[in-house]
Image: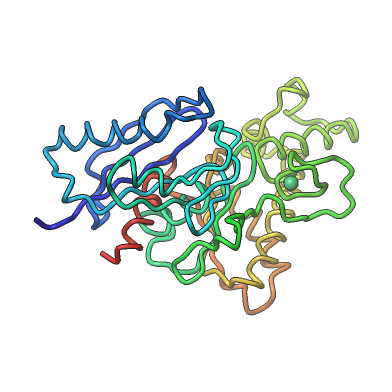
Amino acid sequence: MSKKYCFGVDIGGTTVKIGLFQTNGEIVDKWEIKTNTQNHGSAVLPDVVNSLEEKLKEHSIDKEQVEGIGLGVPAPVNAEGVVQNTANLGWGYKEVKREMEELSGLPAEVGNDANVAALGEMWLGAGKGQKDMIMVTLGTGVGGGVIVDGRPIVGSGGAGGEIGHICVNYEEKDTCGCGKKGCLEQYASATGIARLARIRLKKNEDSSVLRECELEKITAKTVFDALKEEDKVAEEIVEEFGTYLGYAMANLAAVTDPAVVVIGGGVSKAGDILLGYVEKHYQEEAFFANRHTKFILAELGNDAGICGSAKLVIDKTGK
Ligand SMILES: [Zn+2]
């Protein structure tokens, strides 16, 4: 019997997203289960395995036809599939790959969720056909995946590609969630953009549609909506966001020379309008030989994680 399926599993703090794929990239089915974080998240992997087995029955697929299970987890993951600490799931040290293989009887591959999402976009989304790509996910924080020659940079401890914590401002006085000062995340995440907006609005009394909103209620979306109305203050804020993100990408490009930078996450819902602001500053700052890099929006949305997790398995088995 020929093996031709695999699972992609994206484990998040509230839900686990799961996809059943054919190894050619076709999604057969996708669904979600709740993440049970009680008892240090001890039920998370068994719940996933139960759900996978039910799905195989439902589709009358024999376990023999499944190549393996790929998992994306919200933590640094080393090459052995071990995590040290996963606050969102309640996990401490956990040998995720080994446990998953024992529970399921199938080969398992594990990656960091942001790295895996980047792999997904490269396989089936915006980065299709590319081998050198940076993906930046602008959500509550800034996540990222740096892909070189088709593989995400994992690093010695699994913390490669943590783009959000590159220092882009040595003068910053406010502290990032990570404890450092001047991280990209402080300017380019959804919360970072809202922070830039509050700082800008307090600076003077310039008129702006943003003043119709309570200062504490301003979000990245409010800012981009105002930008689309050609609000001058919103434009300044997005310009500042673009400066930091563009410069950070230029510095990364000097190391990895990506063909494309894929921008995803909630902030990317602002659409094409944001690309111009980032690309302009990238072009100003990039080394001349890196200026060919294109900026594009992510295409897979929440499916990037399951796609990339499945691809981890396919890359491993070479099929
Ligand atoms: Zn930080």
Front-most of residues 72 and 49: 49
Does residue 38 sit above or below 194 in this rendering?
above
Q: Quadrant of the N terminus?
A: bottom left
- Quadrant location of residue 47? top left
Does residue 288 sit above or below 161 in this rendering?
below
Q: Position of residue 185 (x, y in %)?
A: 70, 45
- Quadrant location of residue 292? bottom right
Q: Position of residue 37 (x, y in %)?
A: 50, 26
Residue found 89% across the figure and 43% down from its top: 173
Q: Position of residue 139 (x, y in %)?
A: 59, 39
Front-most of residues 239 and 45: 45
Left or right: residue 17 compared with residue 13:
left
Residue found 90% across the figure and 51% down from its top: 171
The total number of labels drawn is 0
Left or right: residue 220 compared with residue 62:
right
Q: Position of residue 105 (x, y in %)?
A: 27, 46
Front-most of residues 218 and 186: 186
Front-most of residues 303 and 312: 312
Q: Quadrant of the C terminus?
A: bottom left
Furthest-left residue in this view: 1
Q: How is the image coloured?
A: rainbow
Residue found 58% across the figure and 72% down from its top: 257
Residue found 64% across the figure and 36% down from its top: 229
